[in-house]
Image: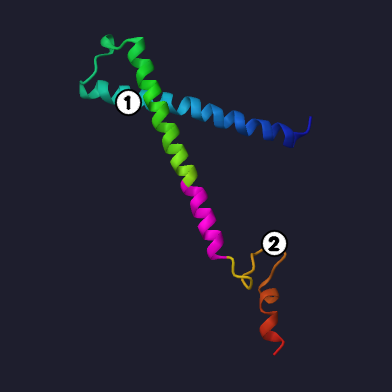
Protein backbone atom coordinates (compact mmCIF):
# COMPACT_ATOMS: atom_id res chain seq x y z
CA UNK A 1 0.00 0.00 0.00
CA UNK A 2 1.38 3.37 -1.01
CA UNK A 3 1.79 5.96 1.76
CA UNK A 4 0.20 8.71 -0.36
CA UNK A 5 -2.81 6.44 -0.92
CA UNK A 6 -3.26 5.99 2.81
CA UNK A 7 -2.94 9.77 3.30
CA UNK A 8 -5.61 10.32 0.66
CA UNK A 9 -7.93 8.01 2.57
CA UNK A 10 -7.06 9.58 5.91
CA UNK A 11 -8.10 13.11 4.91
CA UNK A 12 -11.82 12.34 4.31
CA UNK A 13 -11.89 10.26 7.49
CA UNK A 14 -10.40 13.14 9.48
CA UNK A 15 -12.87 15.61 7.97
CA UNK A 16 -15.75 13.26 8.77
CA UNK A 17 -14.59 12.90 12.38
CA UNK A 18 -14.32 16.67 12.76
CA UNK A 19 -17.82 17.13 11.35
CA UNK A 20 -19.11 14.44 13.69
CA UNK A 21 -17.34 15.43 16.91
CA UNK A 22 -17.09 19.23 16.69
CA UNK A 23 -20.80 19.61 17.54
CA UNK A 24 -20.25 17.29 20.50
CA UNK A 25 -17.60 19.65 21.84
CA UNK A 26 -19.86 22.64 21.21
CA UNK A 27 -22.68 20.77 22.95
CA UNK A 28 -20.48 20.05 25.97
CA UNK A 29 -19.49 23.70 26.20
CA UNK A 30 -23.13 24.79 25.84
CA UNK A 31 -24.27 22.46 28.61
CA UNK A 32 -21.40 23.56 30.86
CA UNK A 33 -22.25 27.24 30.40
CA UNK A 34 -25.95 26.57 31.03
CA UNK A 35 -25.13 24.63 34.21
CA UNK A 36 -22.76 27.34 35.45
CA UNK A 37 -25.31 30.10 34.86
CA UNK A 38 -27.99 28.09 36.61
CA UNK A 39 -30.28 27.86 33.60
CA UNK A 40 -29.97 24.07 33.45
CA UNK A 41 -30.07 21.44 36.15
CA UNK A 42 -28.21 18.31 35.09
CA UNK A 43 -30.84 16.04 36.66
CA UNK A 44 -33.55 17.53 34.44
CA UNK A 45 -31.64 16.84 31.23
CA UNK A 46 -33.11 13.97 29.20
CA UNK A 47 -31.66 11.98 26.34
CA UNK A 48 -34.15 13.59 23.97
CA UNK A 49 -33.01 17.08 25.01
CA UNK A 50 -29.37 16.08 24.48
CA UNK A 51 -30.18 14.70 21.03
CA UNK A 52 -32.07 17.88 20.15
CA UNK A 53 -29.16 20.07 21.25
CA UNK A 54 -26.74 17.87 19.30
CA UNK A 55 -28.78 18.08 16.10
CA UNK A 56 -29.12 21.86 16.43
CA UNK A 57 -25.38 22.22 17.00
CA UNK A 58 -24.66 19.91 14.06
CA UNK A 59 -26.94 21.93 11.78
CA UNK A 60 -25.34 25.23 12.83
CA UNK A 61 -21.86 23.77 12.39
CA UNK A 62 -22.63 22.42 8.90
CA UNK A 63 -24.22 25.70 7.77
CA UNK A 64 -21.27 27.74 9.04
CA UNK A 65 -18.79 25.36 7.42
CA UNK A 66 -20.65 25.64 4.10
CA UNK A 67 -20.72 29.44 4.30
CA UNK A 68 -16.98 29.51 4.99
CA UNK A 69 -16.42 27.10 2.08
CA UNK A 70 -18.45 29.21 -0.36
CA UNK A 71 -16.81 32.42 0.83
CA UNK A 72 -13.38 30.88 0.32
CA UNK A 73 -14.28 29.76 -3.20
CA UNK A 74 -15.63 33.19 -4.02
CA UNK A 75 -12.49 34.89 -2.72
CA UNK A 76 -10.20 32.55 -4.62
CA UNK A 77 -12.11 33.07 -7.87
CA UNK A 78 -12.17 36.85 -7.58
CA UNK A 79 -8.57 37.11 -6.44
CA UNK A 80 -7.38 34.90 -9.31
CA UNK A 81 -9.33 37.06 -11.80
CA UNK A 82 -7.68 40.20 -10.45
CA UNK A 83 -4.20 38.74 -10.80
CA UNK A 84 -4.71 37.45 -14.35
CA UNK A 85 -2.21 40.01 -15.66
CA UNK A 86 -0.01 38.17 -18.21
CA UNK A 87 3.09 40.11 -17.14
CA UNK A 88 2.62 39.09 -13.53
CA UNK A 89 4.66 35.98 -12.87
CA UNK A 90 4.20 33.58 -10.02
CA UNK A 91 7.17 32.90 -7.82
CA UNK A 92 8.57 29.42 -8.09
CA UNK A 93 11.39 27.81 -6.10
CA UNK A 94 14.00 28.17 -8.88
CA UNK A 95 13.23 31.84 -9.55
CA UNK A 96 15.54 34.64 -8.53
CA UNK A 97 15.19 38.39 -8.64
CA UNK A 98 17.53 38.44 -11.66
CA UNK A 99 15.07 36.29 -13.67
CA UNK A 100 12.29 38.86 -13.34
CA UNK A 101 14.51 41.85 -14.17
CA UNK A 102 15.86 40.48 -17.48
CA UNK A 103 13.62 42.77 -19.57
CA UNK A 104 15.07 45.91 -18.02
CA UNK A 105 18.68 44.72 -18.31
CA UNK A 106 18.51 44.27 -22.10
CA UNK A 107 18.05 47.98 -22.78
Q: Is residue 70 magenta?
A: no
For this orientation, the residue located farthest to the right is 1
* Residues at marks 2 and 1, CA–CA distance in whole angstroms: 47 Å
Instruction: Give x and y (percent) for residue 25.
Output: 41, 26
Q: Height in image: 65 above or below 59?
A: below
Mark number, residue 44: none
Q: Quadrant of the N terminus?
A: top right
Q: How is the image coloured?
A: rainbow
Q: Quadrant of the C terminus?
A: bottom right
Badge 1 marks a residue whose secondary structure is helix
Q: Residue at x 45, y 43 (%)?
A: 68
Contact check, label 2 and label 1, Cβ < 8 Å: no
Drawn side of residue 15 relative to residue 51, left or right: right
Q: Main secondary structure of the magenta part?
A: helix
Instruction: Give x and y (percent) for residue 2.
Output: 78, 33
- In the image, 71 versus 4, the foreground residue is 71
Dot 2 or dot 1: first in sequence order is 1
Q: How many marks?
A: 2
Q: Which residues are magenta?
A: 71-83
How crowded pointer 2 is (Cα within 10 Å; few <14, some 14-19, many 20+) is rated as few
Drawn side of residue 3 relative to residue 17, left or right: right
Image quadrant of residue 100?
bottom right
Q: Residue at x 28, y 13 (%)?
A: 42
Instruction: Give x and y (percent) for residue 95.
Output: 70, 67
Mark number, residue 93: 2
Image quadrant of residue 35?
top left
Mark number, residue 30: 1
- In the image, 13 versus 80, the foreground residue is 80
Drawn side of residue 23 relative to residue 100, left or right: left
Instruction: Give x and y (percent) for residue 94.
Output: 72, 64
Badge 2 marks a residue whose secondary structure is loop
Q: Residue at x 36, y 18 (%)?
A: 52
Amino acid sequence: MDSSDSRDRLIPIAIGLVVLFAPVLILALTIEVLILTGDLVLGELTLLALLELYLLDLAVFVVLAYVIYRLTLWLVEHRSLDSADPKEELWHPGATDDDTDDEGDDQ
